[in-house]
Amino acid sequence: MKKIDLAEYKIDKRKLPQHIAIIMDGNGRWAKNRNLQRIAGHREGIESVRNIVESCGEIGISYLTLYTFSEENWNRPLNEIRKIMALLANHLESELPELNKDNVKVQFIGRLHKLSGGIRRKIQKMTETTKNNTGLCLTLAISYGGRSEIIDAVRKIIRAGVKRVTEKSFKKYLYTSDIPDPDFLIRTSGEQRISNFLLYQIAYTEIFVTPVLWPDFKTPELLRAICEYQQRTRRFGRT
Ligand code: FPP
């Protein structure tokens, strides 16, 4: 990949978002625009995943969280679910050496018990192999729902018999207990909604919606988005 020149995009290396979260949307529309099957859009979407992971690693982003498959996505036609799961299974296996070489730590959040045994084993292998890596921390949200995450946290608290809960202690029960809240949330393909993604964590996150479809979202689009992030003033409720 060509070396990224941040100055070309007027990006200040010292003010990068520490954590970027992305709702990757528009694979189906990308395929439809080309009279292709939806799965062709998901396949090209994986190219964007690879490109954005590499770019984030190279420019020094610490955390990247990708909304890969939502709990609601289980309601899609079985045929599409099967194809997405097959893609996922293949890539969890094939991308592991490269991710590991790039020092990426990969982790997974969501109701992973709903996934097949085969995918769960690949998830475990990827998590285990990359757990001591010190570069980009890549979190893939699979079978993930923000409301389920909050409910799961409450259940853990009840089970542990905890009587006093604070914002600080509550965070420890979320799937994302070990990573900071996102600074920047990007959604591709123009829809202006959150779609049940990281509901608790995005309280003060800057949101950026681009009309670009996910398979067309590559390094230049990421850099333009980060440039826009750097124009914003984050006030966290203060004046
Ligand atoms: C949204 O497009 C995309 C998905 C539901 C699946 C995203 C999954 C991938 C890109 C694969 C990721 C793989 C790895 C290894 C991380 P859509 O189908 O909702 O598009 P539409 O809104 O245009 O129909």
Image (cartoon, rainbow, N blue to C red):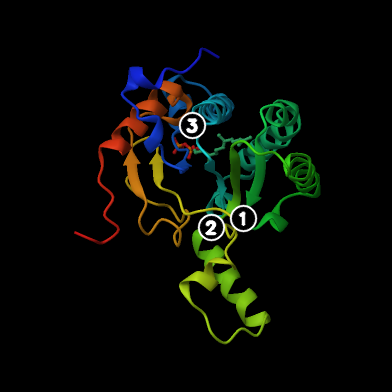
* Residue hosting label 2: 145
Q: Is mark 3 within 8 Å of ligand 1?
A: yes
| Residue for point 71% across, 51% down | 115
At label 3, the amino acid type is Asn
Which label sits on residue 110?
Answer: 1
Vertical placement of residue 62 versus 160, above or below = above
- Which quarter of the figure has residue 189? top left
In the rendered structure, find residue 187 and report the number of the disc placed on it: none
Measuring 51% from the left and 29% from the top, which residue is drawn there?
52
Ranked by sequence position, the earlier of labels 3 and 2 is: 3
Mark 2–mark 1 CB contact (< 8 Å): yes
Residue that extends furthest to the front in the rendered view of this protein? 14
At x 71%, y 27%, the residue is 101
Other residues around mark 3 within 10 Å, as few (<14) / some (14–19) / many (≥20):
many
Q: Which residue is mark 3?
A: 27
Asked if residue 191 can be seen in this view, the reply is no
